[in-house]
Image: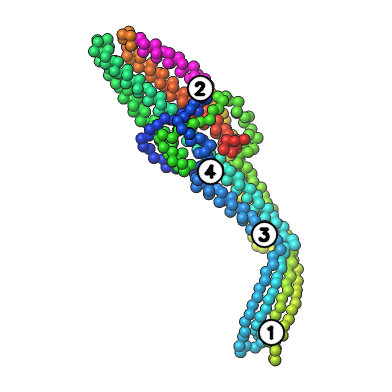
């Protein structure tokens, strides 16, 4: 079921240059203008993305199929009318009627197979509703991942842009120190190479960010450009949201509930096939009027009738038995599919819980390391600026360490959000809400 949902979410993403900075969701962070929120993206995707409409149409079709079959179990009334003349035929052969009007009412008094089939369609409709929720949950989860990646790459763009500006100033300083004989040509070359490498890294990150922005635009139908502000909700950096790994964790997962309803539907189908061995009883009544030519005039006749019909199956060449066997096999298929999905959910949940725990540990470490790496770089740069008492290579290493720690911190926070949202998705918290 999860793979069935995912195949409707495949999109083609184009890559191009991108400009602008996004704001990562930290307390107190602000963006210029009104940011494009994650909730708005999800709401737009559920409204605009074709897969969502497909799921709604499928659920609507299942609902009307159930209503149609249920209506066929109710008493039916039909009226027929006819008018005609015959010329040259024997009235004894043609009945000589020129006009008639007849009303017929029919009702099944006892037909367990059809009643059980109606119940089966009712369960299929419930399953289709959960399938719709499952696809919408999958779509919301996909939007969240793209949103988190776009925000993360935006933060990395800002880090690299700041680093490039600092490196440009550092390169100018190194050249001045070279002219004073305080550094060597190698110091200038190392700084220039580091600057070029950082510029290349920035271009790569910008392309990745644009890819995620294009993904958001494709999913939501909202024109998301490079200058669009994105802002993540603030989440407590904690693993307390992790629930025990048991079947009860997934009791609200719509994909699993859809399969369970489908299994119930197949059980009713098995019963309906078996019920075809039972007799059926129906009642038919009619009332009518007939005009018939007579030798000198027309005669008019009125009347009514009723008929009780009992149908008792005796021998059907195994057709019913084969139908029962086929229904039982379909029920087993759904049962095993449910077990496969449950195993997949458990494995994914364990992995997501580990990822969340790892992300929290990394965030706590990086928060401490970012402060230390900045202090270390400031100290090295001050010594170098004061007369080159250390080599530029040492300063570049300290700068690279600081930048790498900042980039890793952004990735750790992204992993935390993704793991947190995946746990919500697996638990079946539709759109991440309770």
Q: CA–CA distance between discs 2 and 4?
A: 32 Å
Which is more foreground, mark 2 or mark 4? 4
- Residue that badge 2 annotates: 363
Q: Is residue 82 above or below residue 39?
A: below
Q: Earlier in the sequence, mark 1 or mark 4?
A: 4
Q: CA–CA distance between discs 1 and 2?
A: 96 Å
- Assess disc 3: are there few (<14), some (14-19) or many (≥20) residues with their C-alpha within 10 Å of its C-alpha: few
Q: CA–CA distance between discs 1 and 3?
A: 37 Å
Quadrant of the rendering where the C terminus is positioned: top right
Quadrant of the rendering where the N terminus is positioned: top right
Which is more foreground, mark 1 or mark 4? 4
Which is more foreground, mark 4 or mark 3? 4
Q: CA–CA distance between discs 3 and 2?
A: 60 Å
User: In this view of the protein, can residue 387 be seen by the observer?
Assistant: yes
- Residue that badge 1 annotates: 292
Q: Earlier in the sequence, mark 1 or mark 2?
A: 1
Q: CA–CA distance between discs 1 and 4?
A: 65 Å
* Residue 380 belongs to magenta span: yes
Q: Earlier in the sequence, mark 3 or mark 2?
A: 3
Residue 71 bears which disc, if any?
A: 3
- Residue that badge 4 annotates: 46
Q: Secondary structure at mark 1?
A: strand
| Stretch of the chain drawn in magenta | 362-384
Q: Position of residue 333 (x, y in %)?
A: 60, 47
Q: Secondary structure at mark 4?
A: helix
Q: Which residue: 59% across, 52% down?
A: 60
């Amino acid at each position: 079921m999860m793979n069935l949902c995912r195949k409707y979410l495949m999109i083609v993403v184009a890559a191009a240059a991108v400009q602008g900075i996004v704001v990562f969701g930290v307390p107190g962070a602000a963006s210029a203008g009104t940011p494009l929120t994650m909730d708005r993206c999800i709401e737009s995707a559920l409204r605009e993305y074709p897969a969502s409409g497909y799921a709604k149409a499928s659920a609507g079709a299942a609902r009307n199929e159930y209503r149609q079959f249920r209506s066929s179990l109710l008493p039916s009334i039909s009226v027929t009318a006819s008018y005609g003349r015959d010329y040259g035929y024997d009235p004894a052969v043609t009945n000589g009627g020129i006009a008639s009007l007849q009303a017929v009412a029919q009702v099944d008094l006892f037909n367990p197979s059809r009643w059980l089939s109606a119940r089966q369609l009712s369960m299929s409709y419930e399953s289709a509703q959960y399938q719709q929720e499952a696809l919408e949950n999958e779509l919301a989860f996909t939007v969240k991942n793209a949103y988190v990646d776009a925000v993360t790459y935006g933060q990395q763009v800002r880090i690299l842009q700041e680093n490039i500006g600092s490196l440009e100033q550092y390169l100018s300083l190194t050249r001045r120190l070279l002219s004073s004989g305080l550094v060597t040509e190698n110091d200038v070359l190392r700084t220039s190479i580091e600057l070029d490498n950082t510029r290349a890294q920035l271009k790569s990150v910008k392309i990745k960010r644009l890819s995620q922005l294009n993904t958001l635009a494709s999913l939501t139908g909202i024109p998301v450009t490079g200058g669009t502000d994105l802002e993540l909700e603030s989440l407590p950096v904690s693993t307390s949201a992790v629930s025990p790994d048991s079947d009860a964790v997934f009791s609200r997962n719509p994909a699993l509930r859809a399969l369970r309803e489908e299994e119930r539907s197949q059980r009713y189908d098995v019963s309906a096939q078996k019920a075809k061995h039972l007799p059926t009883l129906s009642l038919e009544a009619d009332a009518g009027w007939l005009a018939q030519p007579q030798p000198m005039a027309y005669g008019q006749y009125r009347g009514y009738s009723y008929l009780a019909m009992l149908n008792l199956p005796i021998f059907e060449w195994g057709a019913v038995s084969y139908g029962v066997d086929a229904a039982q096999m379909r029920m087993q298929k759904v049962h095993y599919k449910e077990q496969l999905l449950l195993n997949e959910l458990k494995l994914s949940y364990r992995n997501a819980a580990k990822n969340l725990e790892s992300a929290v540990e990394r965030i706590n470490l990086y928060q401490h390391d970012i402060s230390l790496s900045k202090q270390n770089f400031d100290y090295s740069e001050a010594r170098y600026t004061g007369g080159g008492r250390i080599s530029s290579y040492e300063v570049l290493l300290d700068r690279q360490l600081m930048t790498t720690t900042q980039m890793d911190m952004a990735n750790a926070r992204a992993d935390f959000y993704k793991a947190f949202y995946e746990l919500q998705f697996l638990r079946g918290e539709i759109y991440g809400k309770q």
